[in-house]
Amino acid sequence: MKRKYTSAIAALAATASMSLSSCHDAPDYDTSALGTFDCLWETVDTRYCFFAEKDVDWQEVRDRYRPRVIEGITQTELFGLCSEMLAELRDGHVNLSSAFDISYYREWWSLYPQDFNWRTVQQYYLDFNYRTLGVMAYAILPQNVAYVRYSSFSAMPGEGNLDIMFSYLSPCDALIIDIRDNGGGELTNIRPLVSRLIHDKMVGGYISHKTGPGHDDFSKPYPVEYEPADKGRVVWNKPVAVLTNRSCFSAANDFVAVMKEVPGVIIVGARTGGGGGMPFTAQMPNGWNLRFSASPMTDVRGKSIEDGIDPTQGCEAHSPAEELAAGRDAILDLAIQKLTNH
């Protein structure tokens, strides 16, 4: 059975954005357990983009796992074995989906402190008095600092809704954008928010795509550009703090990389979780679906953002669970202090 795989790669040239997509026929693999295993391993081998960053010898991994695909292995057992093998990549963007389970590498965040409790913010900082705009909640803190909680890049309020929110917050002296626990979503949802916070066209980073089956076969990096909001839109012209924790991943991670380059913006909290590649999907001979990163992204200096983004110097902070339970959020407190200079 032939498998099909597709990828969506945002390769942005200097003058315009352009989306590249491809669909390829791959070598035949049968639907047996070994056929499925070999298909999965080979797909990752020729398409995955972070072998160097992860320091993974993928051939050595194959040599250890393939002998475990024994005669009579069940689909459930095979799925567990394949999931275990994929976990060697230590990548939260790598998922194997079946009718009965989805594999997911959780240690990219589970080995780190949470540093966030939304209930704490609602109760002790907002007094449960805030407005809701889909995936966003916003309010004005007593220090005359605007607070926006953005929980997921899976959605973005419309331009008119953003106008209403920024108009309401405009009397404030500074803005906090809290994306802690934001696991990502659509990269396209970064643009509307960034556009309200910049005043000149800027390069937010670079992206490459695979050009061949070799682990180092990549195109030249293409700049990822951002434009200010259209004339007439409500924009923000005052200081900004972006709050982060280890559970900021994928599109949230990319947003932090971009915002770190914007003048007047500080990143406060903990190092983000990473996940800096564009996704690629493939179907295995037995119907399972595989998803992983195939197009690496870097910051403006060419440094990979796969392993996360550090806070601004002097702005690292952590919010221990016991303090959050007592109503104190050290990351939010530090952001307020930095923005108000006291």
Image: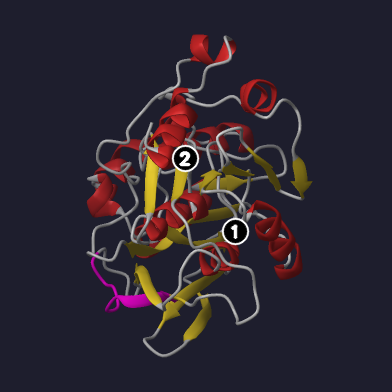
Describe residue 236's horizontal placement relative to residue 126 as left or right: left
Residue 143 belongs to magenta span = no
Residue 319 appears in view: yes
Measured from the top left, where is residue 39 in percent x and y? 47, 57
Q: Quadrant of the C terminus?
A: top left
Q: Main secondary structure of the magenta part?
A: loop
Describe residue 159's horizontal placement relative to residue 215 as left or right: right
The residue range painted magenta reads 216-225
Measured from the top left, where is residue 175 in percent x and y? 53, 48
Give the amino acid type for the residue marked by disc 1 in the picture: Pro
Residue assigned mark 1: 285
Label 1 residue SS: loop
Instruction: Identify which residue is drawn at 69% across, 60% down.
Output: 167
Instruction: Identify which residue is drawn at 53% across, 33% down.
Output: 80
Residue assigned mark 2: 243
Measured from the top left, where is residue 96 in percent x and y? 56, 46
**Number of residue marks:** 2
Instruction: Identify which residue is drawn at 75% across, 62% down.
Output: 161
Against 127, is 7 above or below?
A: below
